[in-house]
Image: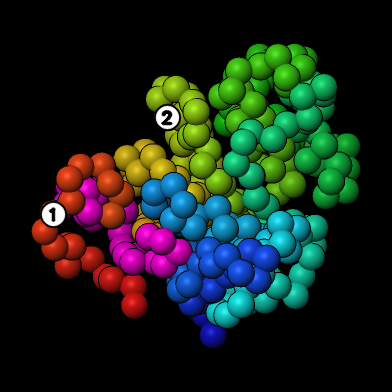
Amino acid sequence: MPGNDVILVVDNVHATYNHAITALHGVSFELRRGEILALLGANGAGKSTTLKAVSNLLPAERGQINAGTILFDGGDVTRRRPGDLVRAGLVQVLEGRHCFKSLTVEENLVSGGVGRSGRRGEISQDLERIYDFFPRLREKRRTLSGLTSGGEQQMTAIGRALMSRPRLLVLDEPSMGLAPLVVQDIFLALKKLNQETGLSILVAEQNSAVALKYADYSTVLENGVSVLSGGATSLRQREDVRAFYLGQKAPPATPPSHLHAVV
């Protein structure tokens, strides 16, 4: 059993779609409380499927976990409905900046507090906290979300998730399609949240440079398997690791060995 400092355990998970298409066949990692873990890998490596498995969202897409275990706070996530996991503190921000585009930014945020049955005073307090972390949302609070920029929509989606007071925030490709300065603003806010509130964060990213800059640890996926696990600083400083596993340059002749390879 994991120790009390571990909030999420993913142990040798295998998953398919439609009982036929293999998506994961050996993904393992642990996330300790109050830390940020970056899940890295090229497109199609299995990052999104892993996050959906963590939030028990695979069945909604005809996906199945065929082997392995996923424990959130010591409990098997496959035995809990996604809504129950959210109420227990595991909240995911899906890829694609999902907002209610016909609602204002603030109405979107409030919906996150209403979803957890927050009282009016709590919701007001949480709104101010979100605006402190994302000042641009305060400026756009009365604007329809559909009329805001891609970065502001991503901030709104993250803010709405934070309004439900998560203990584990799961983010799928938050940088996708956004300008570098906007991405930096988002990750700076996430790091500040992590440091000031102790929020645990699991983030899947193709943008390894920004993810490794702000994460504490990282796990690299390749073709549905976790192939490397180690400190983010170690990964960030090794050009050969980034080249071999993340495809940023021509790969070296042999994979680097100083990091812990996941078997």
| Residue annotated with mark 1 | 252
Q: Nearer the viewer, mark 2 or mark 1?
A: 1
**Residue 138 x, y percent position in the rendering:** 67, 19
| Residue annotated with mark 2 | 184
From the viewer's perspective, tell me whether residue 38 is left or right of residue 240: right
152 shown above or below 258 = above
Marks 2/1: CA–CA distance = 29 Å
From the viewer's perspective, tell me whether residue 40 is left or right of residue 141: left
Considering the image in quadrants, where does the N terminus appear? bottom right
Kindly identify the amino acid type of the residue bearing the numbered disc 2. Answer: Gln
Magenta region: which residues? Answer: 222-244
Marks 2 and 1, the one that precedes in the sequence: 2
Kindly identify the amino acid type of the residue bearing the numbered disc 1. Answer: Pro
In front of the other: 98 or 45:
45
In front of the other: 25 or 34:
25
- How dense is the environment of label 2, judged by Cα within 10 Å: few (below 14), some, or many (20 and up)? some
Mark 2–mark 1 CB contact (< 8 Å) = no
**Residue 252 x, y percent position in the rendering:** 13, 54
From the viewer's perspective, tell me whether residue 19 is left or right of residue 259: right
x 18%, y 62%: residue: 255
From the viewer's perspective, tell me whether residue 65 is left or right of residue 196: right
x 81%, y 33%: residue: 110
x 79%, y 65%: residue: 81
| Residue 79: quarter of image | bottom right
